Amino acid sequence: MINSYYIRRINKAIDYIEDNPEDKITLEKLAEVAMFSKYHFHRIFKIVANDTLNNYVKRTKMEKAAKLLITNKNETISNISYRFGYHSNSNFSRDFSDYYGCSPSEFRQFENRPVNRKTKITNDINLVFNGIEEIKDHFVGYTRISTGYNTDTISKSFEKLYHYSLDNGLLKSINHSIGVGYDDPDYTHPDKCRYDACISIDKAKLPDDFPFNTKVIKGGKYATFLFTGKKEDFYNAWDIIFKEWLVSGNYVPDNKPHFELYLHSEEYDKGIFKAKLCLPIKPIKN
């Protein structure tokens, strides 16, 4: 079993990769963020993340770029490649083709894109547009699941983090549970999808030996949706938001993860969840 110290340190490096997709990600910088020697960081990263550093960085960029190609129809491929640190379209196209088996322009045009999961959109999900909100920053403790959206694993991670926070007087609000899913199974292999089980906590009361990672979920302008349904319905709800609300409107997704703010559910014992689904947005620039 990997020592939790190593997991927390590598998670800091992964958070840096997620927050700085436009930067040239260097070994020296990531080693500094994780507080490991650059001479050993590659090996430690591979053991903890179950992937090489180069593969992880490239995969993360390609999957984010693929989603932007579909959701940001007005943005040029050159701009998208530049957003992910590429100063050459040919290098971006080469890496994209290596990952998806087609060029970025072909990927954007395909009706049947090379994906890992076919999502069935239904009208049975209780999903209501709640408006555009300015959401504040949330300081959270979190546990990262990097082996897919396994609901049992996610539930156990939330329980462990919640009980520790409750026992140590760290809970900051009633609506304290936040889920951050980084990957779409349509673009990322289901076993590689990453999810952060987060609890909003009081930073001022944080003990020095807090056994979980911490970070700030960045606030800003979000489109919010009220969701009621079973845990397996979250996937379809997000697909509806992206495919039926986002791409037909006047916004594009901002460069931050979307998240689920869990609300009190009177039918939780029946497996019915309530949540506010929060999608970071910014206006389309014509």
Image (spheres, rainbow, N blue to C red):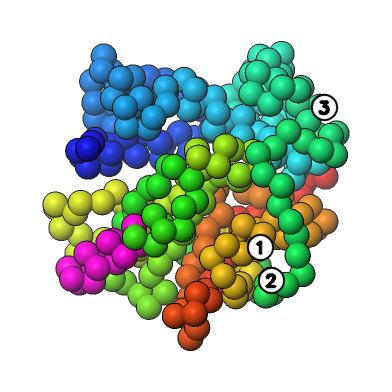
Residue 165, quarter of picture: bottom left
**Residue 106 has which mark?**
3
Gap in Å between the C-alphas at discs 3 and 2? 32 Å
Q: Which residue is mark 1?
A: 237
* Region in magenta: 157-170
Q: Is residue 158 left or right of residue 179?
A: left
Q: Earlier in the sequence, mark 1 or mark 3?
A: 3
Q: Earlier in the sequence, mark 3 or mark 2?
A: 3
Residue 139: tell me if it is visible.
no
Q: Which residue is mark 2?
A: 125
Q: Position of residue 250 (x, y in %)?
A: 79, 56
Q: Is residue 278 left or right of residue 2?
A: right
Please tell me whether mark 1 sits on a helix, a strand or a loop: helix
Do the CB atoms of the residues marked 2 and 1 lie less than 8 Å apart? yes
Q: Position of residue 52 (x, y in %)?
A: 42, 22
Q: Quadrant of the N terminus?
A: top left
Q: Write the residue at 34% across / 57% down.
A: 157
